[in-house]
Image (cartoon, helix red, strand yellow):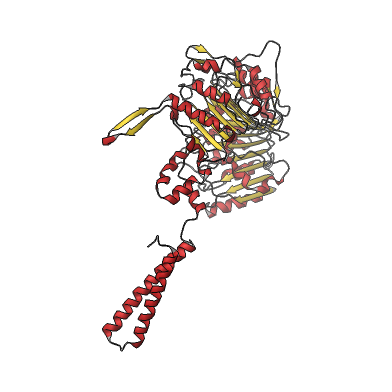
Amino acid sequence: MATERPASIINQLRELWSKGGQLIEGLAVSRGVPSSYEHLLTSLKTVLQDTGDMVHMLHNQRLPVHRVPPEVLIRIFSFVKISVDDPDSAHPAPVRWTITVHDDRKLHPLLLVCRKWRDLALNTPLLWSHVMVVPGMSDDYLARSASVPLTVYISGAISLSTTRLLASGGMIITQETSPSSFYQSLKSIGKIHSRIRVLHINFADSINISWIAGFVATLGAHQLEECSIRFPSERSRLDGGFQRHVSRPRLTLFSGGWGNSGGEKLRSLHLASVPFLPSNRFPALTTLSLSNATIIASVYGGSRVPRWGLQDLVDFLSGSPRLEELYIRNVDLELRDLPFSGTTRVTLGCLRQLVLDVPLHTHISAVQRAFSIIGYPGHCHVLLTTFSASQPDDIVAQLLTTLPCTDSYTRLRIRAVEDEHTTLHFVPASGNGSLSMCLRVTDQPYARTVPFNPQRELRALFDRAYPWCCAVEELWLELAEDDYYYGLRCVLGRFPSLRRLVVSQPCYVSPGGWYAHIAEALHLLHPARNGTVACPALDTLCINIPAYCKDVEAVKQVLLSRARSHPVRRLVVGYNSMLEWDVLEEVFSLEELVEEFVCEELPPARRDTVLADWLLSIPQVFEEGGFHADWPKRGSDASMW
């Protein structure tokens, strides 16, 4: 009945209407015989129910209210596609990658459900805009995307896998993928080069890597906007054909494009373990990532691939004057000599973020070499990660003097928590740009498996007061739960010019943990008997009061002890909404001990909340000119931290 046409339904409605009228007339002339009257009522009820079903069916066919609209169904289809896990797994975490790659092959079962679903899926090109290059891929498959822009993903795991097939009789056999079939698939992709906007090439092994080198060298990509290329690691062996395509340290990519240059619209380029640099000029490039390009990685199969030098890097960067983000990870810059003619330097005037992750066996020399060839504006944010040293020996001071910054760093944010590197975040007096350092102190500089120890790192980094400590006027602290007492005592006595201090207590305390009472940690701020005091210029104190706090006596004693000789003029308190009433009463009583008092309830904190960001939720704190709210929020911008 559900497949009947509207005209047939209307004819049946006429018949039911006529039959219903006859039954009503029969009820009118009935003489009240019970058996006859009941039969007429039952028949009329059945006719009316059938009439209602017919009206409902006609309503659905003419006005499909209860049917899923095509645009909603297409949206549901899009969730069937499975995103490819970690298409750029070789790239460091700070690298932003906003493009998601999906496997369109997961849509195939939808084509078998019904004709409507099949027609809808095949006539929606956007559903097929992500292409996984597989052996034997036909042009008909690519035709499903019509003329929409494409995201293409090429992986060695897909190209040369073993396929399980079901033979007659239920026996499972295996069929090995033909390399020539994969080569034909690459040729099919080359035919539609003008539609490719995003290209991922991820090869964990070296089989047929020469085809990939030839593919990216000859692909026409004048519309390409995002590109990620990962070559085999140093443990792999390249086939001999690779040497035919890569005989120099620089290789022209996308030469089959319009004007034989290619990449004119490329905005993002990620190269991992790639032994060459592109010789192209990418004028629109804004994001560049180079990772795992070490000398060891350039040796394959017993033959050395020509190694690019710093001059090659300078020439390449010079072709991308609009570069805004530059990531250099595990690249042995200190071993790549410049020509004897002198030092060549490139200035990237638009650079906003520079991330330098040097190999573990290098320290200051790698940073010095990087900043000897790369110039950047004053508003650029610099992140140095990760330094590992058994003897710090003023490593922070060495890094500060290495960087080309004319202003002294007056603002400092310290993050030292479990399972993370100790991070120092500096902002100069001008407020333009910033410098972040991820430091790790260990007895084994080359070992990555040594557990983190924030307390040990803070003691090593602040074993004495360095000249750069004297310039710091604003300090934000986020310390490990189990090391709060020792952490504060390691740090507070090293900043004689400190005027603004932000102390962030843990929002949550682990059951059975070793969290020390804040009173012992803040006791260092009390004046000593000989009149000396830590942070003598302290003017503003900011502290959060978590729900587990039973009193604020520690803060009160700091204010009282410094009232005569070194008074705290301004107190900022953020309290948890679950704080007990008597503790909250003590919090508000602190207003009598300072000239200016700011107290606000904090929003609920999630487990992934960055602790030191609690102060940013109290806007009136920053109305005073000396305090600034322009810290990069690590919770919202993971690329910087």
Residue displayed at 55% across by 33% down: 192
Residue 234 pos. (x, y %): 49, 19
Residue displayed at 66% across by 51% down: 592
Residue displayed at 54% across by 36% down: 151
User: Is 122 on the left or on the right of 571, as rendered?
Assistant: left
Q: Quadrant of residue 533?
A: top right
Q: Quadrant of the N terminus?
A: bottom left
Which sits in the foreground, 416 or 10? 10
Which sits in the foreground, 325 or 189? 189
Q: In this picture, is 192 found above or below 613?
A: above
User: Is 310 on the left or on the right of 294, as rendered?
Assistant: right
Q: Quadrant of residue 317?
A: top right
Looking at this view, name the residue that lies furthest to the bottom.
Answer: 31
Residue 65 pos. (x, y %): 48, 61
Looking at this view, name the residue that lies furthest to the top.
Answer: 340
Q: Quadrant of the C terminus?
A: top right
Which sits in the foreground, 521 or 366? 366
User: How many marks can you see?
Assistant: 0
> Residue 500, can we see it?
yes
Residue 219 pos. (x, y %): 57, 27
> Residue 450, can we see it?
no
Residue 305 pos. (x, y %): 54, 14
